[in-house]
Amino acid sequence: MIDLAQCVSRDGSQVYRRVFRDQAVYELEREYIFGRNWLYLCHESQLANPGDYVRAYMCDTPIIVSRGDDGNIHAMVNSCSHRGLPVCRSDSGNAKRFVCPYHNWSYRSDGSLAAIPQDRKLGSESCKSALGLKKVPRVASYEGLIFGCFDERVESLDDYLGDMKFYLDSLFRRFDAGIEVVGQPLKWSLSANWKLPVENQLGDVAHGPFLHNSLLGGTDSVKEIDDYGLNCVPRPGHGAAVRLMPEDSDDSARAWGLEGIAALSGNAEYREYLLERQAMAEECIGKVGARIKGLTYGVYPNLSLLWSNSTLRVSHPRGPGEIDYWSWWLLPKDAPEGIRKLLRSNFTLMFGPGGLLEQEDGEAWSQQYNGVNISYMDDSPLHYGLGQGSEGPHPELPGQIGSCYSEHYARAFYQRWRQDIENGLRRAGA
Ligand code: FES
Ligand code: FE
């Protein structure tokens, strides 16, 4: 039996190393974190037409997400009711039926079973209505982001996101034509625990000028973060690291994406487009929303969003020490072709398996995973106490707000993590 006090301290400021490596802890996470919370599946722009589908994962469960003939979005487990094979093998596409390769049972895009070829030969009629693909019972979306939950009793996605919606809106509603996800996600494996990239992108602004010194050290970006950076916890587990630009700042200081490689290119069309969009931002997201310039976001438990590098990512666990990392490219729907090209370079050059910053982060997470495997250190928890007690309400922003160097985002995450497992065990009567 796991002693949760030996995993995470009540205040979240101490996290024991076993949390990142024990198989038994991972089993609890599968059950009570991934089994009970809303998990990101895909973006609505990937499922524009009836029959469109993508493959996804909920923790390590393979999922098909599709738009049915009825126009609704369905999520079901990618495993045949006959002998368990995956019935969908390509990452995305459009299909009238998912046909299992073993004995050719075929399923409609809503997961219901359409035909069993053997029935014809046998002259029998199996009860097809009971043999559809197993459905994910709850599916919902917010601003195009589609989530699923294995627990029928989960609160609505709206309540689950809570004030995180304010921060999501500041990106997703900034562009009146909307945001779209383009192409397939980049996918790669990491030898690390799934929580390490999540925690990093929930609010670890502090590593930027050090780990990424070659790119960021001594730059104006770091100065801007020092001056205006905040870590926001709209609800424990979720997080938004942002810059709240001053009231007297102009559009060029506030515009989304006017930084990084795309800006360094000096492309005038790109600059003009982003300034045009920023000029409309107040109308779309209000005065405060328009002053927000995000850094990184996290939606509990394992969705991250890097604002300026146009990427959404999910840390899929494959046991305690392996991650299947997926990263999508997103951009404003109405971005002209030249700008799409620039934003794509920005995405792939910085974040992705060969990305400059991703290489440094991935190396840090792998080394961190080595560090949590030193059993002699099992009585020495990792310290998450920086800035403890300095967070609080903010006159303009929802949630608990602190300096961007405060670790309250991580304390809140691990407190939520412990609470979820405690609640789960209590409900299970363990
Ligand atoms: Fe799918 Fe037999 S395993 S049809
Ligand atoms: Fe980083």
Image (spheres, rainbow, N blue to C red):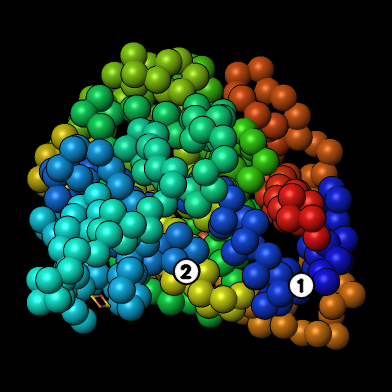
Are circles 2 and 1 on residues that touch, CB within 8 Å?
no
Which residue occupies the foreground of this view, 100 or 209?
100
Q: Which mark is residue 60?
A: 2
Q: Is mark 2 within 8 Å of ligand 1?
A: no
Q: Quadrant of residue 183?
A: bottom left
Image position of 312 with respect to 430: above or below:
above
- Report the side of 158 relative to 29 (left or right): left
Image position of 289 with respect to 145: above or below:
above
Q: Quadrant of the N terminus?
A: bottom right
Image position of 275 with respect to 302: above or below:
above
Image position of 231 with respect to 378: above or below:
above
Q: Position of residue 152 (x, y in %)?
A: 52, 43
Q: CA separation, marks 2 and 1? A: 22 Å
Which residue occupies the foreground of this view, 350 or 31?
31
Q: Which mark is residue 17?
A: 1
- Report the side of 354 relative to 400 (left or right): left
Residue at 59% of width from left, 64% of height from top? Answer: 30
Which residue occupies the foreground of this view, 412 or 37?
37
Q: Position of residue 157 (x, y in %)?
A: 49, 35
Most distant residue in the front direction: 123
Q: Quadrant of residue 387?
A: top right
Q: Position of residue 124 (x, y in %)?
A: 17, 69
Label 1's element? helix
Residue at 12% of width from left, 71% of height from top? Answer: 123
Q: Position of residue 91 (x, y in %)?
A: 23, 66
Residue at 63% of width from left, 45% of height from top? Answer: 237
* Residue type indicated by callout 2: Asp
Q: Quadrant of the C terminus?
A: bottom right
In this rendering, does residue 215 appear at all? no
Q: Earlier in the sequence, mark 2 or mark 1?
A: 1
